Amino acid sequence: MINEWFHSNGSLARDGFDSIVDASIDGWTHTGFRCATLGGDAGPSIDLPAASVERVLVPLAGESFTVDYVLADGTTGSQVISGRTSVFHGPADCLYLPTGSRAAVASAKGRIAIAEAPTSEARPVQYLPASEVPVELRGSGISSRQVHNFATPAGLDCVKIIACEVITPGGNWSSYPPHKHDEAVPGSESRLEEIYYFETAVSRGSNAPAQADPFSLFSTYSSAAGEITTTATVRTGDIALVPYGYHGPLAAAPGYDNYYLNVMAGPDEDRVWLISDDPAHGWVRDEWEDLEFDSRLPYTSKEK
């Protein structure tokens, strides 16, 4: 099966970045994503060129990152953003840079993600410490997951970007029920492209052998807005793009936790995440009311 909107780890690497998603991908318009590993053979810094995009920087792993930036009007600044042991250790600091900015990001060792969206409208530089990132526990039972709403409307004040992180413990499902956001229905559904960046790890507390191979499963399927089929085994560094169509579920294999970073933006005037469940599966939300939330969550900076 050909998954044209799925990109395995390393397949989007260029210009010193582990992955770049931008308008160079045919059919991709409203969102962007970059991931970089700093330190070691990769070197101590990366440059983000001036462009007509707003950006949100969020560390994936590493102690700290220094961001030196120049705004479109020539104003300069510097911000240290603290990292975390891994994406499975609670939220990290994040930094918003407005359209037209350029920046240099440095770290002794670590990995950082950059969410992007084209816009000509400027917002102020914003720093959001990890302690103030809104953390949501969503679903229940085997649909329990943890959401870090760092760049949703509950977090940073972006022009277009809606971004969050989702932690799904081993054996659980997320991005479920399957849903879509590919047509403008006022008050009901918004039009948003979506990027999924994945990481996987052995579940906390597990005594896995050295040859353990963490993975999850992810799927998309068509809607009236367009034809799409993704049936993928996902591992750290993989990326799935959702230009339209239903997406989900993400199923974390037993014994292996899943993380994904979502970046969304679209052509609608309002920055809002409104979805439509697949009518065949939306009923499962009602079942959650009778189930207990997964006691393994929340994952924080400390191991349980």
Image (cartoon, rainbow, N blue to C red):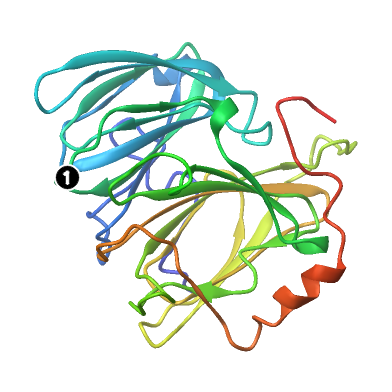
Residue at screen point 64% across, 80% down: 282
Q: Is residue 132 left or right of residue 80?
A: right
Residue 233's place in the image compared with 123, above or below, is below
Residue at screen point 81% across, 34% down: 210
Quadrant of the image for the C terminus?
top right
Expressed as whole percent of the image width and height from the top left, the position of residue 75 reads 15, 17
Asked if residue 302 can be seen in this view, the reply is yes
Residue placed farthest to the front in the image? 187
Residue at screen point 19% across, 38% down: 99
The residue beneath circle 1 is 121
Expressed as whole percent of the image width and height from the top left, the position of residue 142 reads 81, 62
Residue 113's place in the image compared with 162, above or below, is above
Q: Nearer the viewer, residue 219 or 53?
A: 53
Question: Mark 1 falls on what kind of element?
Answer: loop
Asked if residue 1 can be seen in this view, the reply is no
Q: Amino acid at mark 1?
A: Glu
